Amino acid sequence: MKVAFLTAGGIAPCLSSSIGMLMKKYYDYDNSIEFIGYLHGYKGLLKGDKIALSSNNLENINTFGGSLLGNSRVKLTNIKDCIKNGYIANNQKPLEVAASQLIKDEIDILHTIGGDDTNITAGELLEFITKQDYKIAVIGLPKTIDNDIYPIKQTLGSFTAADQTARFFRNIVNENTTSSRQLIIHEVMGRNCGWLTAYSAFLYNKSLDNKTFLPELNLSKEKWDIHAIYIPELDFDLRKESKRLSLIMDNHDCVNIFLSEGAGLNIIIEEMKNNNEKIQYDAFGHVRLDEINPGIWFGEYFKKSLNADKVLVQKSGYFARSSKPNNDDINLINKTVEKAFNCALNMKSCVVGLHQDTDNIECIDISEIQGGKPFNINEDWFIELLKSINQSIQK
């Protein structure tokens, strides 16, 4: 039996661990199984760049973040993009090239670890290769720190990312001591979904309960509180927010904001279009947020409206997503891998994940996988967070 792996999209605190845990399952079952990894996701599959995988110390993989195989963002149905980047020749088709490589390598099972784009692409590849009368099982694992995949309740890596995002702000918030009228904007990854912003804010807010403040020394809890949280799922009026936050700035000499990078994106894009600025898109048609810099846009807006003396915009995304997995994610990965291994033995193609309807690890039909799942703002812990923010504002 030959088993292949590829990781794609952005990195998350689960990629190397997922590969290591899966290999351990296979080794325990049959130590003669061969493993290969395609380098840098579908790019490596198209170009035939691969390595043999083996190790006697698989348990140590959990101590590493990132992906031991490398990642890329490649859409196999975007022929022009694949030709433009030199992944295929002008007369080739990506799906055909990728399928031919799997057949050439005699792969029996392909594990794809990535987000909705990665696994939807895996489904398209499976459909194509099946028509070639080649028997293969394609089994995806859902990875994204945004936690925004239908019908997955909790994606691999998101627990750790939220934990690390909260940790990041626990240090950054101390910058409020560097200046009078200090504005801190903590920009968190999340194009369409505010879960990561919301849950990391919740974890940070909870950590304040264990901190002893010294208001008599100007170390008051109000200066370390979160004063605003902006996510795509919540509407907000910038003018009203400016008035509200101005009062906080006047009273506490600082304002701390958690900002999902997708919050208010329509406002920014509309302004860019009005200014005839070019908007960059990736291979999947997503706006390239790194080139828009939502945090800077909001920083410039609130600097004027709040009369801030200093503005600090800090992005925690790369810090959070590059971490090794925490215990919560290790447990979720382990359960997911167990199910994925059983599906592989039965040659059942699917995406394995924690299903939002059953709260169980399920073998989910690839056709059910979709991106853009919004965060449920009616979660009890989020309502608790908003109440806490409002209470701190009233002090």
Image (spheres, rainbow, N blue to C red):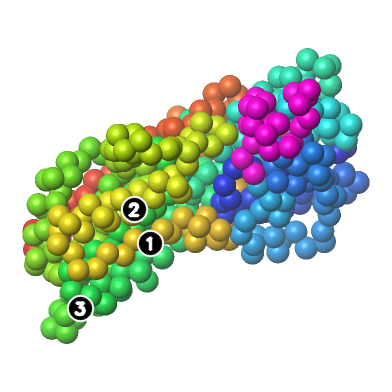
Using the image, tell me which numbered label, if any, was put on residue 314: 1
Residue under the point 64% across and 50% down: 15
N-terminal label among 3 and 2:
3
Dots 2 and 1: beta carbons under 8 Å? Answer: yes
Image quadrant holding the N terminus, namely top right
**Label 2 crowd (10 A; few <14 / some 14-19 / many >=20):** many
- Magenta residues, start to end: 72-93
Q: Which element is circle 2 on?
A: helix
For marks 2 and 1, give the CA distance.
8 Å
Mark 3, Cα crowd under 10 Å, few <14 / some 14-19 / many 20+, is few
Q: What residue type is labelled 1?
A: Gln
Q: Which SS does the magenta portion mostly show?
A: loop
Is residue 317 or residue 80 the one in the foreground? Answer: 80
Q: Earlier in the sequence, mark 2 or mark 1?
A: 2
Quick check: can you spot residue 147? Answer: no
- Identify the mark at residue 341; answer none if there is no mark: none
* Alpha carbon separation for disc pair 3 and 2: 26 Å
Label 2 sits on what residue type? Gly
Is residue 383 shown above or below 176? above
Question: Does residue 315 appear in the picture of this structure?
Answer: yes
Which SS class for mark 1? strand
Q: Check residue 79 for magenta coloring.
A: yes
Identify which residue, 37 or 94, lies in the foreground.
94
Query: Disc 3 marks which residue?
Result: 219
Nearest to the eye among marks 3 and 1: give it: 1
Residue 66 picture location, percent across and down:
62, 56
